[in-house]
Image (cartoon, helix red, strand yellow):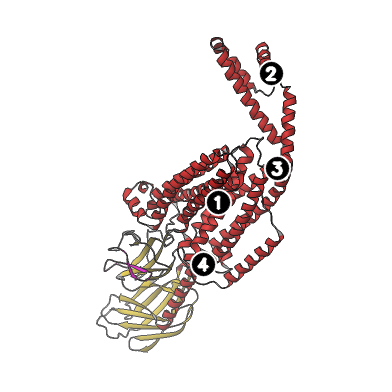
Amino acid sequence: MTLTIAPRVRTLVLLLLAAACALLAGAGPASAHAAVTGSDPGQGAVVDKAPARISLTFSEQVAMSDDSLRVLDPEGKRVDTGKPSNVSGTTYAVPLHPGLPDGTYTVAYQVVSADSHPVAGAYTFSIGAPSKTSVSVSGESADDGVVGWLYGFGRYVSYAGFIVMAGGAAFVLACWQRGSGVRPVQRFVVSGWVALTASTLALLLLRGSFTGSGKVSDIFDLSLLGQVLQTKSGAALVSRLLLLAAAALFIAVLFGAYDKREDAQEKRDLTFGLSIGGVVVAAGLAASWAMSEHASVGLQAGIAMPVDVLHLLAVAAWLGGLGALLVSLYRAPADTPVDRPALRRFSQVAFGSVLVLIATGTYQSWRQLGSWSAFTDTRYGQLLLAKIGLVVVMVGVAWISRRWTGRLAEAAPVEAAAVREKERVGAGAEPAGDVVTTRAGAKDAPAAGESELDTASDHDSDSDSAEHPGAERAAQLARQQEARDAARQKRMRDADPNRFGLRRSVLAEAGIAVALLAVTTVLTQTEPGRTEQEAKAASSSSASASSDTGASGALTLNMPFDTGGEDGKGIVTIDLDPARVGDNEMHVFVERPNGRAFDIPEVKVEFTLKAKDIGPLPVVPDHIATGHWSANGVQIPMAGDWQVDVTVRTSDIDEVTVSKNAQIG
């Protein structure tokens, strides 16, 4: 790539960076990937009785299917009934079977956020007391598995195909502007169209399974395909396919009628028409991403979508043009090198693209991050830093390319003429007849510039030559001439040090561009830093609210007991206030089965945190009144799932210990 940075542009870049600082310093709320901000029952909660339903609150509205919310008992059996429903705003609920037994239950969810990205996860709550469960609570990521890998690869190919097709076509129209040596670039552009078309069809088939079960067998499920076509993502993919039909017509004209035009005025008119049509088609294709991904939801969506389109078009003009330039340097004939005007025009296009990328990238970063801390505290921010680093390295390599470009533009015509003259003198300008005579007299000696493979093929064809000597000899001479031409072209390219240096630097840029595209693809599938931080803040607020609730009301545990003796049955109730780490106040109430206060000789309480090998911590409460005991300053040293053991003695010999687990702290 050729890139010229004028001094006045540095001021513009500094102004853009200053604007970025101001934007990031004063960011407002937004969202992209949906995130769970609350649930009822909460994560890890222990409730006394089975709830009638479970509900989840997301950071934005989501799309739900019949299996989007599942509640599983400790054995992994579903206990939810009916379909999930939107109960209010961004809160969704599913009813449960009545009378669920005690134990740990798993809530698994898989929904599609407003930016068309699937979001999955799971958490647990317990009824009565926690228990062992056979269900994994880690939650399945929508990107895991074969289907997720295929979908991610398809997205990468689709981005690459668009960049190659749009950027290569722009290079031909804006930079090359001549027919000679354009055939390799034509193949380059057509390969981009094929890649984008194939990947779009694959994404359309994979979408249903990717947002649902994740099973390979569901890829060709026509019912799922019908559901995908009714979604925003499905509409975007279908629109992309329709625009690709228009792109095919554009490419046919670009490398057909346009390439063959000789009249300068006609070519200028056709260039203008193709430029307008090409920009419209390319913008439409870019909009098929903007309308279904991060830019379509959240803060300033009306501004973010056109900015996203501009960003993608600038990437295509820069990286796609870079690929076309690389193809020209490696595949175009050496006697038709990339001329000075073409290099200068691409330098201008690339530089303009970089400026657009700086402006649009700054806005996108502010919109998706919202704060400086998100750069390092979120995965999205870390990927964005990697992307920025790759761009900086790529621009540095481009600066080296600029030096080679200047040398090539000055020296290439002279070098090419010198090499051609050397080839002519070295060949001795032998007539064709002399070549035939020489080879007829000495078959075992290859001619100048001829490969050993050609000589071997001549020996193999001797028997055929006896039957058709004239035609076979003409074919041999044609192959020899083709081999000489290829060898001469390669020597001419290798003999030009400036062209060779530019090829190496542009190849390095292309390698960085491949890595840059990979990071960008992952970035578009990653939860934006702003949303991730908002979800963390919401979780912290929820935890704080739960803690405050606990402070205003005691944790209550009801445990029936039976010591086995006469009048040995009853219910012991433990109230722990505020049920947090540190000092707590504990009250113990003992009642008979009929609800009357029950005075017994002794009550003892112990707290054990088995997960951390803490305890048992004994507490002997003081008798306050009939059936009522109390203890102040009960120390809970650490938050966790504590086992509360209560020993009840109803006579000198009748005693029993009952237990219950509870989340404290």
What amino acid type should be assigned to the residue bearing mark 1?
Answer: Ala
Residue 132 in sight: no
Q: Please tell me which residue is depicted at 61% across the width and 46% down the height of the picture.
A: 175
The mark that comes first in sequence, 2 or 4, is: 2
Considering only vertical position in the picture, is 482 above or below 228? above
What is the spatial separation of the Cα atoms under label 2 and label 4, in whole angstroms? Answer: 75 Å
What amino acid type should be assigned to the residue bearing mark 3?
Answer: Gly
The mark that comes first in sequence, 4 or 1, is: 1
Q: Which residue is mark 2?
A: 431
Pointer 4 local density, CA inside 10 Å: few below 14, some 14–19, many at least 20 = many
The mark that comes first in sequence, 3 or 1, is: 1
Q: Which residue is mark 1?
A: 316
What amino acid type should be assigned to the residue bearing mark 4?
Answer: Arg
User: Please, what secondary structure does the residue beneath circle 4 have?
Assistant: helix
What amino acid type should be assigned to the residue bearing mark 2?
Answer: Pro
| Rendering coords of residue 592 (x, y %) | 27, 82
Considering only vertical position in the picture, is 80 above or below 489? below
